[in-house]
Amino acid sequence: MRRSYLIGLTLAAFACGSGPASAETMSDALARAYSNNPDINQQRASVRATDETVPQAKAGWLPKVQAQGTLNYQVSNVQNVFGQTGSNQKLAALPITGQAQVTENVFDGMQTANRVNGAESSVLAAREQLRLTELTTLQNGATAYMDVLRDTAVLGLRRNNVKVLKVQLQQTRDRFQVGEVTRTDVAQAESSLATGTADVSAAEARLQASIAAYRQVIGVQPKRLQPARPVEKLLPRTLDLAIATGLSQHPSIIGALHQVDVAEDAVKVAEGALSPQLSVVGMVQNSTDSSGYPGYNVFSATVGGQLTVPIYQGGAEYAGIREAKEKLSQARMVVESARNQIRAGVVAAWGELEAARAQIVSFEAAVKAAEIALTGVREEAKVGQRTTLDVLNAEQTLLQQRVQLVQAQHDRVVGSYAVMAAIGELSARNLGLGVIEYSPRQHYQATKNRFFGINTPDGR
């Protein structure tokens, strides 16, 4: 069984290109997708953007400093009320006022603390979304790789069938010339050749579609793809273990749990709006030529506490709290929905993998039997015990069994990656791709306490 399995994939591999220098393995293709796929890269950028919500939330703990200044030109006509000579004066002044104010939050009903917790949970949820994107991309890459192998193998089988049918047609025509067969036999051979030629065209179109999908995921054209093996050794031994792993490891579930944390913190933030707000405000002000009098300068400095106690503001805060609670209920339901989806996905993927294993055994036996049958039918046809149609039917049966075997081999490899993805274990590290793994923690550590600067770590 193992020998014919490798033969089927090797046929596909040697039809994908020429020259050993251009050979590419499954690991090479997936490593390329992991590093360069735009879906993964845009999700990485999304995680970095989410990291910035943490220092935004922490800003509620830091002082707010603002400065304001005014500059005017003022002319005043001052008249002595007693009417003395020379009592009228024109005063030209340049009043300049500058002030600075510092506001420090002391207590805000724990809103800032809960916003920080919610932002940190959002970061963790974004990382799980990134892990899901990487998992999906690697699965799509493995599927695209095997699709190209399968369709190349099928195209090779179809083209070889056309060659056989051409020889069969020529032999039938020769036999018709000597009266061994009838015109009907020739027509049957011509019909089979026409059908085989049409099948080649369909196989070529399908291969081109698979190549386009490969380029979309991997980023380059496939060249001399090497045979690929299933990753069954990385899978749990039983279905129950696979389900348990999926329920505990899949990023869809873990991400949904982090979203529950985000929703819980949002409820606390909304409730904090009903709490008293206490802050300390300090202000310094300096005025030159104050009130339009040259040389009349005023400097003042104040510091004090400001307490705000919300009593009733139209009920918006109460509605906000109720809204946050409903969203929390929704987030909890999303977790249950994710668990149901993952459980169903694991069972379905596991069943498809088991079916592919069984199909390989059956189709290998079917191919062997069809080869024996075709040999016998051809020998019997030589002595007149079989018709041309019998030979053509036997050839088509063998072709169909070979195509189905290639499909089953494809399904086994794809199915093993599908199970690994369904349990949340499909990753560059687990596959041993040998790439530099992207670590979202590095950007987060560099950003979480960064309160100055507008440039991103990459210099933009």
Image (cartoon, grey):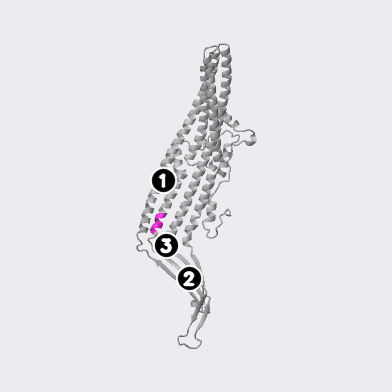
Task: Where is residue 453? Give x, y as percent.
Answer: 55, 59
422 horizontally vs 152: left or right: left
Residue drawn at x 44%, y 71% is 304
For the image, the number of numbered tags is 3
- Give the SS element for disc 1: helix
Q: Which amino acid does label 2 sit on?
A: Met
110 horizontally vs 181: left or right: left
Q: Give the range drawn in magenta.
A: 266-271
Task: Where is residue 273? Give x, y as percent.
Answer: 39, 60
Task: Where is residue 138? Give x, y as percent.
Answer: 53, 40
Q: Which of marks 3 and 2 is in front?
A: 2
| Mark 1 closeness class: few <14, some 14–19, many ≥20 residues within 10 Å | many
In magenta stretch: residue 268 = yes
What is the distance, in whole Å, between disc 1 and disc 2 at their CAs?
Answer: 50 Å
Could you say which disc has been placed on residue 108 in the image?
Answer: 3
Q: Quarter of the image containing the C terminus?
A: bottom right
First in sequence, mark 1 or 2: give its number.
2
- Give the SS element for disc 3: loop
Could you say which disc has been placed on residue 283 in the image?
Answer: 2
Residue drawn at x 57%, y 44% is 36
Could you say which disc has been placed on residue 335 in the image?
Answer: 1
Disc 1, disc 2: CB below 8 Å?
A: no
